[in-house]
Image (cartoon, helix red, strand yellow):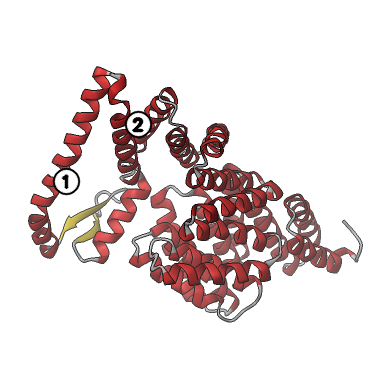
Amino acid sequence: MNRDTYQRAKARLLSLGFTFEEQQADNLAFRYLGLTRQGEAFARALAPAVELLASTARSLEAELDRLEADDQPSTARRRLELLDLVADREYSLGLWDSAFDRATRLAALAHGSEDTAREARGRVMLGRILQKRDRPEEAVGVLSEALRLADASRAYDAGADAEYLLGAASERRGDWVRALERFDAASDRAERFGDPLRLATTQQGKARLLARQGRAAEAHAILREVVATLEAARADEELPRAYASLGSAAYLLDRPDAVQAFEKAVEAARRAADPRIEAHGLTSAAAHWIDARDFRRADAYLRRARTIFADLGERSGLGAAELNTANLLGAQDAWTDAEGHYAEALRLARETGDRFLEASALMNEGQMMKRRDRRNQAVALLTQARGLFAELGSVAKVARCDEELGELIGPGTR
């Protein structure tokens, strides 16, 4: 399975007390999991059910393989049902190679059977996997076709998912205007499909971008509604991300309850065994504790976040944690160490194409150079940051850079 699925499973088993983790002195590159006594007892009790589920899955796969080998037109409907089911199961298990193969076959068979809605769903899954594998251009092509098919068949659920993923791709490229259009379209489709949870997800994407553009008050209002919807639905899997987004908007507004939202995100992520969002929540909460000069707590949060992101292979998240680590060190006047972490944050931002993170790292390092009275370096860094923020349409960040530059070289200078 992929790293994300493995780390979520590991987090759940550790939280339940069914496993323990240790690192052996003779091999520090590896950490080992073992069953506790309670875990072993539960595993023995679970074994019959595991075998039953496994045999059911095997029987479905065997039926699918047999029908595919015969390739009779009369069995096309049943094969589509099985491909849809098996592909979704394998994706949920993090078996992306086999899920990709199944989804490819699903789309091809649906196309031949003129089942446009199911072809759209197959292509959405392909696009989702391509995005996770960091192949954005291929993903956009597949998702654009999925969207066309979804519209043709009025498959609003697949259309909403395709629009949202295309919006995320535009956001990653820094095309925020197009991303907002995509998120609005995704929300419209989710609303027509009558799916409040899918609608909440699309609204989170919109709010995230509004906050980055400097429209934090609008983002905060949207996210409060999203959180209320998810809490009412007891959507435990979706709540951690919503709390983290709400905290980010509140932090930009200097609201004192921002840290509470971040802490809620961390707690909810741990309950849902979602280490990725736990790490994002810890990274964001650390910014608050740096401002509050609680450096010990901020350091503990960032150490944990960096470990999780490294385990997941999440380079963009690791870049954000590196940036806040640099800010933490800079706040303590550990200038040289801070420079190293700023450099690492910049490297990761450029590798992953995260232009907002790149601009933020340049701005924060420029602010540090300003405090160190290194005027020329500060001006150069802040000017680069301003240019990137202007391209992205982040009005508030451009204004902040102008303010800093004005204090260094006078107002009206670019």
323 vs 126, left or right, is right
In primary-sequence order, the first of circles 2 and 1 is 1
Q: Nearer the viewer, residue 295 or 63?
A: 63
Task: Tell me the amino acid under the disc marked 1.
Answer: Leu
Measured as percent of width and height from the top left, residue 261 is found at 50, 74
Image location of residue 366, percent across then percent down: 72, 60
| Image position of 263 with respect to 384: above or below | below
Q: Quadrant of residue 258?
A: bottom right
Q: From what the image shows, is residue 255 above or below residue 46?
A: below
What amino acid is found at the position of numbered circle 2 in the picture? Arg
**What element does badge 1 sit on?**
helix
Q: Nearer the viewer, residue 44 or 220?
A: 220
Residue 102, labelled with which disc? 2
146 on left or right of 88: right
Measuring 61% from the left and 57% from the top, which residue is drawn there?
Answer: 206
Q: How many marks?
A: 2
For the question of whether residue 374 can be seen, the reply is no
As drawn, is 44 to the left or to the right of 394?
left
Frontmost residue, 362 versus 39:
39
- Residue at 44% from the left image edge and 65% from the top image edge: 240
Residue 53 is tagged as 1
Residue in front for this viewpoint, 19 or 114: 114
251 vs 276: above or below: below
Q: Position of residue 324 (x, y in %)?
A: 56, 63
Image quadrant in which the C terminus is located: bottom right
Q: Residues within 10 Å of mark 1 (few under 14, many from 20)?
A: few
Within 10 Å of the Cα at label 2, are there few (<14), some (14-19), or many (20+) other Cα atoms?
many
List x then y, in percent, for residue 20. 21, 61
